[in-house]
Amino acid sequence: MSTAVQATEEREQRLSRARAALGAAERSAARWGGRIDRTALRSSPQSVDDAADDGLGTRLPVPGPLATLFPRGSLRAGSSVALEGAASTSLLLSLAVAAAGEDSWCAIAGMPDLGLRSALDAGLDPCRLALAPAGGEQRPQVLSALADGVGVLVLGPELDLAPALWRSLLGRARTADTLVLAAIPPGRADLTLRTTTQGWTGLGQGSGRLRRRRLEITAEGRGIAGHRTARVVLPQVDGMIAQAPRSAAEDRAGEGPMRLLPPVRRAG
């Protein structure tokens, strides 16, 4: 059996599991109203080769300002990323938007305060988005089904996952090539991002409102020797993140050591 045929069959199996998972999530979230557009789950013969696969696993894109934090500037499908610190929700959504692309489904659990408007502003397609409630006796089954069936699974800080369930979800995600993005998980992830706020902009002389924040993000984990650091600004007008501008001190440091002029003899 050729690799293309196997990939097609695996995709059909994932789509079947996704339909079952979304049915459970739809019933659990019925109190929020609305319906999930299931037509987006129809298989497409061209979507198998949409993501880059270099023999080491399918690679998923990341936001441009964060590319320097990840090995080879991308994420591996089936891997996991943990986020700790400030602005974790904004970063989770930014990573999910980039990784999901134009044809993958994204499921979000453990963010009860996240509105559809916020998800839309971040760039997520509501027709390919499933919001799963954090509580309920069927939570482990729902999360396991989502890990089997969607392309990107976002786990918010309100889930309070048990370590055993976290390990089970990671195993399922690796098998199904599902990217897992989690805020403060109860166990280790392939990569960990830690953020600290460097400052805010927007306030004037006692008036105005906070508009943007400057963050420093440190990444460590598999494929990274030591750690990597990036500075970003969020949010932008379109809800995305941008690379933080260099400060005057950093610009001077990048120019190298100051060159001294040779002494000049005084005439006479």
Image (spheres, rainbow, N blue to C red):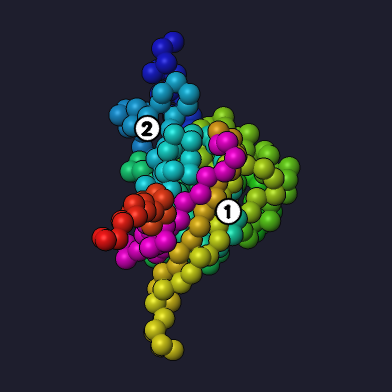
* Foreground of the two, 211 or 78: 211
Q: To which residue does mark 1 refer?
A: 194
Q: Position of residue 143 (x, y in %)?
A: 60, 46
Q: Quadrant of the C terminus?
A: bottom left
Q: Is residue 19 visible?
A: no
- The residue singled out by tag 2 in the image is 51
Q: Quadrant of the N terminus?
A: top left
Disc 1 to disc 2, how far (Cα)?
A: 27 Å
Q: Secondary structure at mark 2?
A: loop
Range covered by the magenta-colored residues: 224-251
What is the x, y in percent for residue 242? 37, 57
Q: Residue at horizontal 42%, vertical 57%?
A: 250
Q: Amino acid at mark 1?
A: Arg
Residue under the point 52% across and 45% down: 228
Quick check: 142 left or right of 231?
right
Q: Nearer the viewer, mark 1 or mark 2?
A: 1
Q: Residue 209 appears at what percent x and percent y?
A: 41, 81
**Residue at the bottom extreme of this rendering:** 206
Q: Residues within 10 Å of mark 1 (few under 14, many from 20)?
A: some
Point out which mark residue 218 bears: none
Question: What residue lies at 63% left-to-right and 60% top-to-bottom?
Answer: 158
Q: Identify the secondary structure beneath mark 1.
A: strand
What residue is shown at x 55% (from left), y 61% (from top)?
196
Residue type at numbered disc 2 = Ala
